[in-house]
Structures are given as C-alpha cells and as structure tokens.
Amino acid sequence: MPRVKTTHPIPSREKNQISLDLPNYLTRYIPQWGQPQWMNGAMWRNAVQWQPMAVACRESLISMMGNLDWRIESRDSNLRDEHKTEIDYYEKFFSGTEDWDYIELIEWLGKDLLDIPFGGAVEVGRNGNEPEGQILWLELLDGATLFPTLNKDFPIAQHIAESSIETVYFPKHRVNRLYMSPRTEIRLKGWGMPPPEKIYLALEALNRGDRYYANLLLDTPPAGLLDLIDMSEDSATKWLKSWKDLLAGVDPFKIPVLYEHASAAQFVSFTKSPTELMFDTAMQKYNQLCAAGYGITVSDVGISSSSSGGDTLAGSIRSERKTRKTGLSRIRNKFKYFFDRLLPEYLMWKYIDLDDEVSVAIARARLADAQAWALFVDKKIFAPEEARRQHIADGLMTIPLPEKVPADAKWPVPAVGAFGKPAGNPKQNELTQSPIAVSGGGQGEVRQSEALDIVLDNDPTLKEAFEKTEEVWDQLSEEDKIMVVSNWQDILSGIIHIDENQSEKIQDQESI
C-alpha cells in the first residue's frame, strides 16, 4: 500500500456482486477532486450561521455531549486488569493533548457533524503506520475539504481548492469519520444529510421573518402608496422630487411636508402589520420545527414552548425526557461508535449518562422481577437457572453475564442460628417463634440475638444443653422437634423476651 495515494481509486465491488453501480463519469459532475455543488460544506455552514435558532440548537447538543462523563472499559469485564495499562493510556490520550482537549474535540467534530453533509473526520496517526497500531496523535480535519470516494481501502479524500491542486486519499486505518443520516440516493452514496438540510424550508422561513421584522425597526419609510388626493400633478411631482432629495444622505429618514391640498393625504401600506400576520405565532412554529430537526425542543435552548407563559414542571420533565431519547441519544451513539472505531477491538467507549427516572424504574423492575421469580422457584414452577436466563434476557442487567452460574462463583455464607435455622430473622427461627403476643398472655417474639448469647455465656450448663440440642436436631422426628421447641421456648421465655410494643431486650438474670 503506497504511503500517499494521489490517483483517484475506483469504487469497490464485492465478490460475485451483480447489482449495478454508476460508471465513474456519472459519479461526479465536477472534477474528481471536487464535491457536488449541493454538497458544498461552506454553503451549509453559511446557512446555519445566518439563522441564530439553528446555531442555538447545534450548540445545545454540543453542550449536552460535553457535559457527559465517559470512561474506557474492557469488552470482557474479566480482563479489565490485563488491559489496565492500555485503558489508562487511552483515557489520558482522549482527555487531551498539546493540540486539543476532549471538549475541543467534541466541539470540532460536533460542529461539522451537525452542519455539513460530509460530517466530521480526524486523521489518525498510529504506531508504525499499522492498522492495529497504537494511536499516537489525531489531526482534526475540515469536513468541508473532504469527500467520499466509495473505495473501501481509501474511503475519504481531501482537496483544498484555495491552496493546493493535489488531492490526498486517506487509507482506511488513517482516518475516522462520523456523519448524520446517510443518503439513500445512489448518486449521493457516501454523503449524509445534516439537520439544516432536513429543515431548510423552516430555516428559510425564519430568515425571511427576521428580515421582515428587522425592516420594521429601521428608520426608512415602509413599502406602500401615498394618495395625495386633491393635489395637482405639478405640485405632486415637485413635492416627490423634493422628498427624494430629503431621503439622500447619511440619515435617509426625513420628515416630508405636504401643502396646497384640502383633503387629508392617505397612505396605503403594501404590507400587513405584525399583529395581522400573527408574527409571534408563526415564528414560534418555525422555531419548533427547527428544534425538532435537531431532535430537541425549544425549551432546551432557553425559549419557552408556550407563548402564554413559562413551562410547567411536568412539561419541562417531558421535554427533557424526549430530548434524551431523540437528539442527545442519537449524537451520543454517533460519538460512542466513533471512539469505538479508534480503540482496539477488545476495548470500548462508555458514556456515563445517569438518568434518575430510568435508574429508579430499573431498580423497581429488578425488585418486582426478583419477588416474582422467588415465588415461581419456591412453588417449583421454574428452576433457578431458568429464572437467571430470563432475567438476563429482560435486559435489566447492564453488565455482561453468562447464562449459567460460574462453577467458581463464591457465595456469602449465611449465619446459622438455633437448630440449623438462619439467624437474624426471628420469624424464620422455630426456636424463637410464638404466635401469641405478651399482652395476650403468650410469650411474644423471643429473639436469638446478643441478649441470648449473654444468657448462654452466663450459664455454662444451659449453654452446653443448647449446643447438644443443636447437634441432634436433624436426627429428631417432627413430633420430637415440636416437643423440644416447646420446652426451649418455655425455658427461654423466662430468660429473655421482647414485647411487641417495646424495642429493648429484657434480660432477667434472677430467673436464670
């Protein structure tokens, strides 16, 4: 592969491909180093720059992206320690270099991504100029000087008409690109459609409305017809000539004077007033269309979505939720895959985008799922392994998990209480159960806790008997277990019990 390619490559074709491609002479109507006129990047940049609403939408999305935290992870979480050196290198590299920092990188690429059909691109410098070599530097490119070649080995070319007659073709591993909405027309294959191109008519309407309203504020006579009514032709002609002389100069607005007429002069305007045109309502509609083209709402750029007043709290929350699922989500995924293509195949880029509502919803779903599956497993309707597989398939877990529990998985050992029962929950311990409250003449809840340990430690004989009972517990019949539990409850009820209406544990040393 040549180090620098300066001849135009032919479009790539797959092996045994039978679908047609346009011949080279129809691929472009201009010299090979140029771009179609309707794809000119400078034209679209000017179109956006002329409309403040489009600029505000673009900057809002770039600000949202710059506000997201990020990190680099291993695709296999078990190998994170093995890849720690490379993860640290790339996290430091993408945080910034001597030429740019992360925010500048997002601003540069985001501007071209949201403005021009080609999108944004960077030249990638790799160690040894190898396709899998470590990235050493990134050169930010002007998207308006780039165009696609439809060749897989050399997908992008650059030509700067103002300073060079040479065209440079980038190898696949030396360039990385992101762009919006790939064009489906065969003539425009390889190009994208940025938001300004999608909503161009709305942008043009906003431009016309801005010019109309600006003209109303200027010190020049509005377009219209002045009816002088009873003034003679000679007088009217002389007056018109003198008025033209008055309009000349630095300040063209002068006060004309009419005379020699008995009836009042009447001015007939050629335009309508902003009130009649409903200017505010019309401009609000086009602002909303413009914002929708970027996948956001007008409230995201600081404009109220309602002309009658401010936004409600519920309305603002819904707008933010919609923006997260449309404009921000799309741009975030564009940048994620852009960085994934730069990283080695065993590493991935991850944005930390915490959504309070989503986090709460996921937590509730996990809790409800766990309770339902616990019941299914307890009733032996499903097996635990089936519950695990279904839980993973539901997508509630955000980390990669195997469908089967690993053989070397380590589980916490639960504390064992009296007679082999789990400690800590008195209602699950046969020794400490009593269905009748103390206030009703029963024994209440007798808890095997720190107080019981104190009792047993203070009476070695009682402790020895308690331990022997635990040793033979599994060998007893159900009738013997009931009798033993009843006897121990009678013994312990005089030692320690907890009333339902009190929280302190009562220890009666005298009864021991």
Image: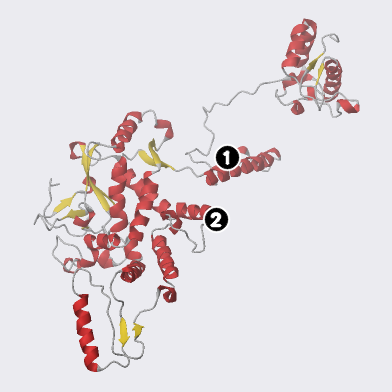
Q: Which residue lies furthest to the right in this view?
A: 441
Task: Reply above or below: 110 against 431.
Answer: below
- Residue indicated by mark 1: 388
Circle 2 packing at 10 Å, graded few (<14), some (14-19), many (20+), is few
Specify the quadrant of the image occupied by residue 341: top left
Residue name at image x 71 percent, y 20 percent: 417
- Residue indicated by mark 2: 312
User: Looking at the image, is mark 1 or mark 2 nearer the viewer?
Assistant: 2
Query: Which quadrant would the C terminus be assigned to in this image?
Result: top right
Give yes or no for contact between labels 1 and 2 (Cβ–Cβ under 8 Å). no
Amino acid type, residue under disc 1 in the picture? Arg
Q: Nearer the viewer, residue 507 or 151?
A: 507
User: Does residue 463 appear left or right of residue 321 in this picture?
Assistant: right
Label 1 SS: helix
Residue 188 percent coordinates (x, y): 26, 65
* Numbered marks: total: 2
Residue name at image x 51 percent, y 60 percent: 309
Q: Which of 244 and 275 is in front in this view?
A: 244
Circle 1 packing at 10 Å, graded few (<14), some (14-19), many (20+), is some
